[in-house]
Amino acid sequence: MEFGEFGGQFVSGTILKGIKEVETAYEKVKGDPEFLAEFHRYLREVANRPSLLYEAKHLTAVLGGAKIYLKREDLNHTGAHKINNALGQALLAKRMGKTKLIAETGAGQHGVATATVAALFGMDCEIHMGLEDVLKQSLNVYRMELLGAKVVVVQDGQKTLKEAVDSALISWSIQSDTAFYLLGSAVGPHPYPTMVRDFQKVIGSEIRSQLQHCENRLPDIVIACVGGGSNAIGAFTEFIPFSNVELIGVEAGGKGIETQYHAATITKGKVAVIHGMKTLCLTEADGEISPVYSLSAGLDYPGVGPEHAYLAQTKRVTYVSATDEEAVQAFELLAKVEGIIPAIESSHALAEAIKRAPIMKKDKIIVVNLSGRGDKDVKQIARYRHIELVD
């Protein structure tokens, strides 16, 4: 196990062979100065890093209390944090001599990022996406196709992110000699959770240095949304050693965690094995994986990254939930007072900041990781508010 009792490699056959090949390759490059220099060069030149740390003065004034900063991952190329990890894994794939990238996607942002780096590096690309998420995120499906990717629409089970991962893993097991599985979140068998964290930890590193520059101090609270957990682990890792920095992960509360319509894995889950890892998972009484629900296509996953499960167990990170309605209200408020339309995933984290800021002193600082932009969500939010937009 990599994170206490959580993690591991619960896979076999050709998938295990592919995982071991990735593990060996990553062990060789993770400390290689040449590889890391190339990765950071692409972060600057392609991802548009460092991303802005934005003082949300109007939101702070409206809420009163703590000062709020937004880590603007929405300003990255492709519109989310996903490009950081996609670049790192694609560079590893090239080092391994692979010619094709296979990935899963929920909200479509990881799919777009993967298709983007595939186009950049001249590689074939295959993206697996559940039908329910395709219907929610048709714009991102078309973006992936514009970038040259083949989008595989998955119609099994709940037709969401879990089934997309299942489908992508099966496809990779058949093509592992020439293809690389570019996993988008901090989930799956080792080394993926560690590898994704390492490629995303630039987020927290930048937050620390940027806040040091403008405030000469650490934040009091860092908040991020949690589905699989890549943006959150990216924002949290830098601050884990600092016990005076409170870390808060916000899961999808859907229609309420007292109902069956949510994806609050850490809040309501049990220890189980899913997608090659031991972690916390939403399960039925018979041990089967539960169906999950969220307005957000990027958070409707029944498991969570094993490092998040460990951080919850050790109480280093506090995990809470926000409902669809709370996230939509946060989405609308940020748009109105700051002129920023956040992803509905990120709006879950913002909702928690909106709850906390008014009851904190004005000399306190909250940083919210704004993991993506909300262009993809506008039509869905309008529909949620019973407004039909004409194409």
Image (cartoon, helix red, strand yellow):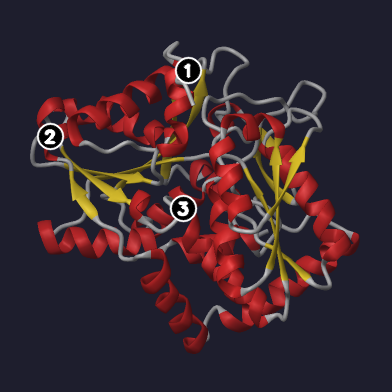
Label 1 sits on residue: 383
Residue 58 image label:
2
Q: Toward the viewer: 292 or 136?
A: 136
On screen, residue 318 above or below 380: below
Q: Toward the viewer: 280 or 250?
A: 250
Amino acid found under the numbered disc labelled 3:
Ile
Of badges 3 and 1, nearer the viewer stands: 1
Residue 2 visible to an observer of this rendering: no
Residue 233 image label:
3
For residue 293, what is the image quadrant?
top right
Query: Residue 110 location, x and y as percent?
Result: 56, 51
Could you tell me which secondary element the residue under label 2 belongs to?
helix
Contact between marks 1 and 2 (CB within 8 A): the answer is: no
Query: Residue 375 location, x and y as percent?
Result: 41, 38
Q: Toward the viewer: 92 or 365?
A: 92
Which residue is depicted at the point 30% across and 56% down?
242
Query: Residue 20 location, x and y as percent?
Result: 77, 71
For residue 204, what is the image quadrant?
bottom left
The local crowd at label 2, few if under 14, some if 14 to 19, many if 20 or more residues have their Cα within 10 Å, is: some
Which residue is depicted at the point 83% across and 55% down?
171
Amino acid found under the numbered disc labelled 1:
Arg
Question: In terms of sequence position, does the residue under pointer 1 or pointer 2 come before the other?
Answer: 2
Of badges 3 and 2, nearer the viewer stands: 2
